Image (cartoon, coloured by chain):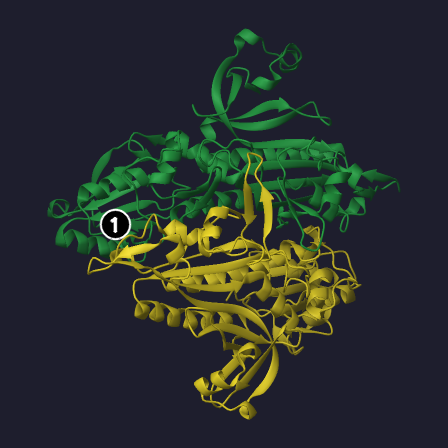
Chain colours: A yellow, B green
Amino acid sequence: MRLSTTFVKTSRTAPKDETARGAQYLSRAGYVYKELAGIYDYLPLGLRVLDNIKGIIREELNKIGCQEVLLTTLQNPELWQKTDRWDPSKVDIWFKTELAAGGELGLAPTHEEPITNLMRSFITSYKDLPVAAYQFQTKFRNELRAKSGIMRTREFLMKDLYSFAATESDHNRFYHQVEQTYKAIYNRLGVGADTFQTFASGGVFSKYSHEFQTLTDVGEDTIYFNADKSVVLNEEVLNDEVLQDLGVKREELQSARAAEVGNIFTLGSKYSNPLGLLFTDQDGQRKDVIMGCYGIGVSRVMGVIAEKFSDDKGLVWPENIAPYKYYLIGIGERGTEVAEKLYRGNEDIVLLDDRDARPGEKFADSDLLGIPYRLVISDKTLADDTIEVTNRRDGQTTLQKINDFVLSKA
Amino acid sequence: MRLSTTFVKTSRTAPKDETARGAQYLSRAGYVYKELAGIYDYLPLGLRVLDNIKGIIREELNKIGCQEVLLTTLQNPELWQKTDRWDPSKVDIWFKTELAAGGELGLAPTHEEPITNLMRSFITSYKDLPVAAYQFQTKFRNELRAKSGIMRTREFLMKDLYSFAATESDHNRFYHQVEQTYKAIYNRLGVGADTFQTFASGGVFSKYSHEFQTLTDVGEDTIYFNADKSVVLNEEVLNDEVLQDLGVKREELQSARAAEVGNIFTLGSKYSNPLGLLFTDQDGQRKDVIMGCYGIGVSRVMGVIAEKFSDDKGLVWPENIAPYKYYLIGIGERGTEVAEKLYRGNEDIVLLDDRDARPGEKFADSDLLGIPYRLVISDKTLADDTIEVTNRRDGQTTLQKINDFVLSKA
């Protein structure tokens, strides 16, 4: 993309209402625009990051046979009354609204109820199982307070996956597959090394659920871990019984701040039972379908990565999710000419800074936007037939022969 | 995709609550699932159709320099009060909700107000113009009645584009570009020949707006047209003044039923003025930005196409938006083997019916699902080294030499 063609401009001043560094940069760099507290627009470059994250998640889920659907925002109270999650004393983050034709509706904060009900039309026999379906959907949560930019918002993009199995062992097999898939996803997102599968409280149907927690100072959670024993647990389950279960002593644990970037739950028959999602087993018996659910907050992950990978100059996107891989600056008449030539055919991976601006401004925006590689072509570099390549992460600059230089998509 | 792996099953009986044929098929074929009146889920094949439509629209809009964004569902009343579109006596299709922290919010039925306000952060000078930004967003309209399946719903996917210009002539130039782009889009969607740009009422800032109307018996509109004079107008503007403007007599017009599949409006300063979106012109004067808006109801278009292209056996998707291009059936042991071989590497364009079902059932589902080409490989066809290819649209069957047969992606 040519920077001259985008309507977005970067800003030198941090918004007063964002406290976290990544959130300030996302706003200053023009990735997001705050409509109201906890309610953000995604501008062109921000949307590209979001789409890159979605693309990685989609590819990995499709590999293990998950099917993509798109459920609705507007929710039928009847379904949620059956599971006792409609009443505000039970679930207090609902946004509710009224149909002009009469009757209340909710804005989905999650989708267990509608997808369980939907599956009643398609799952009748053990032969129809297992099933796994997911979506990318905007969720709504009526939080009293919103904070940390796009990390905890009232309207956010979520990937939610639901699994349906005939037996506990089938369920467990899929659950473990998702564990592996999540690890692959966080690796590709660039946070694999600092993301830990963490024991968390499980609810009614299993002793534990699992969270995926990424180490970051602005995280809302405290996790405790022991690297030698590969044990990581959330503070909320730090008690004697759990420590005994996991075979680790309190004094062997280190603590760290982390942000949740995903969670996986065994639901058992918590939703299938009240909503009547049953199947006929091989022995002719009618049984409750065994369910699991698996979430990744897509916009939240983007927020966590923005916090985690930023320095005093701006954002530092991991390559796989950066909106563009290269930030190209041509200086002087010939530099500009050669940059234009390099740009052609590479519009999808190169952000060409063709604005009428000083080089210093362009360098600063390249850093603020967090594009992985800055490329500079000037009379000076051309004198040696070179192009200057600077890695955003470590600031290392190398001069490469321009005739050998190849832009790589991967 | 292998049909054996999808959780969706087709149904032999039409849903009682859908009256239109296309809507019945969309439900029977498992493309959509009705949550509530006017509120539909998209199941895997339905989502693919929706994504194909989005893909075509996105490509064409990007060609003319439009930039994709993603605005929010939740709306700040303050902005809509400034344009007098918050009060229910002025706009009666709002869904409204309450923040737990206090204060009312709306669910966006359209996005003129927030995008006009957003642009105040980026447009200050004539140098910042023109700008065109669009999004694919779920819209919410609190219709008293919902009907015709996914053609008129309470929650729907819309492409909305907004343009910002310094002068009327700049605005008009872009408006005409969008006219051409819309024609290209409807051509690629397969409805070009039956879609007409239609004069409709314009509102305050221009005498006319334009609708794009597709001929179909289940359409909600009546259009009047004269093929020789290339004049098409909506019934709502059929009066003497308009007829004189367009140089056509009432008796020269034929009428037809049609469904609106898009609209384009000149907004002038209707939103920029009350919301304070001004720019400084070359002469130093502060002026209102001149706006236009351009909509295509993505899910609505899918519904219109489902109605328009269906016969007594089921849906008949145009190739460019069909969820898969080929429906492949292997019959008998060798037929199945060869089909499996043909399927490999073509998972993205072939729906392989590998279900344990009778051929007749598979043929019926192939028709119901509306996949453009049915491919059958059986002992009988293999005896002549052929594959049977049936065109869904005209039912024509040909036998083609299997060694020469190539699946084409385009």
Q: Is residue B326 toward the left or the right of residue B303 in the image? A: left
Residue A322 coordinates in the image, percent (x, y): 59, 65
Residue on which the image places disc 1? B353
- B28 lies above or below A283: above
Q: Nearer the viewer, residue B152 or B208?
A: B152
Name, please, the residue furthest toward the top.
B251
Q: Residue at image x 44%, y 60%?
A: A161
Residue B289 occupies which quadrant of the picture? Answer: top right
Q: Please tell me whether mark 1 sits on a helix, a strand or a loop.
A: loop
Do we see residue B347 in this rendering?
Answer: no
Q: Is residue B398 toward the left or the right of residue A369 in the image? A: left
Name, please, the residue furthest toward the right.
B284
Residue A56 coordinates in the image, percent (x, y): 48, 63
Crowding at dot 1, Cα within 10 Å, few <14 / some 14-19 / many 20+, comes out as many
- B121 lies above or below B200: below
Q: Residue at image x 52%, y 68%?
A: A262
Q: Nearer the viewer, residue B292 or A332?
A: B292
Quadrant that contains the N terminus of chain A: bottom right
Q: Is residue A94 toward the left or the right of residue B368 in the image? A: right
Amino acid on which disc 1 is placed = Asp
Residue B397 coordinates in the image, percent (x, y): 22, 36
Q: Residue at image x 30%, y 66%?
A: A167
Q: Nearer the viewer, residue A261 or B190?
A: A261
Q: Is residue B318 toward the left or the right of residue B300 in the image? A: left
